[in-house]
Image (tube, helix red, strand yellow):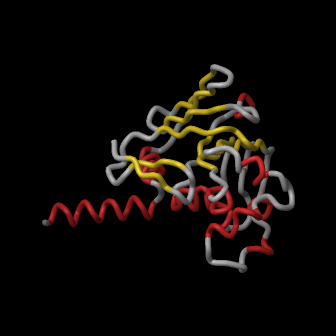
Amino acid sequence: MVVVLDRRFGRQRPGPQGEEKMLKGKVTSVFGDDVNTDDIIPAVYLQQSNDPAFFAPHAFANIDPEFKARCQPADANVVVAGKNFACGSSREQAVYALQYNKVVCVIARSFPDIFYRNSLSNGLPLIVVPDPTGLQLGDDLEIDLDAGVITNRARGTTLRFEMKPGDRTTFKAGGMTTRVRAHLEEILLAQR
């Protein structure tokens, strides 16, 4: 398997071939229902920078000021939430605020379509499960996107999830831009 370290997000992702992908991370935040994008990145910061890394220190500034401090020690963080995580206005900065705090995955009961599309475009895997309450702060998780299984190493439990095959491929590729770029490179190589 070809593996590339994506330094922006502090995690490994597959190389251009889109090989198998196992995500590993620690649950460093657990939220309830209806956390909106203004909770994730307050609107006051939206026009202050074009640099995606700018948004990391401001993540959850109004509702969870300790978020960044909890994320820093871990190599890879997982956020767990209830239903309708990241509802509200469309802002790609909400995805950046998570990714640049080394969040490798968000597991929730549901996501609004616009946040799901923004995450898919930027390569932040979102996993829908009917009941995430068995995932607690501090749990070490392994998420197998291919098998659709979350393994909770701390509790010795597993949780299954469904994902559309195209979305799985896109998340594994690191996002839509990366997936399209890899596809174009394959076409160019085939023409040589």
- Residue 151 lies, in percent from the top left, at 58, 28
1 left or right of 160 in image:
left
Residue occupying the point 75% across, 44% down: 29
In the rendered image, the vertical position of residue 141 relative to residue 80, given as above or below: above
- Residue 74 lies, in percent from the top left, at 66, 44
**Nearer-the-camera pick, 95 or 58:** 58
- Residue 180 lies, in percent from the top left, at 37, 63
Residue occupying the point 65% across, 42% down: 107
In the rendered image, the vertical position of residue 131 relative to residue 12, given as above or below: above
3 left or right of 120 in image:
left
- Quarter of the image with the C terminus in it: bottom left
Residue 97, image quadrant: bottom right
Q: Which residue lies furthest to the top in this view?
A: 156
Residue occupying the point 72% across, 79% down: 48
69 left or right of 139 in image:
right
In the rendered image, the vertical position of residue 126 relative to residue 145, given as above or below: below
Residue occupying the point 58% across, 62% down: 118
Q: Residue furthest front?
A: 73
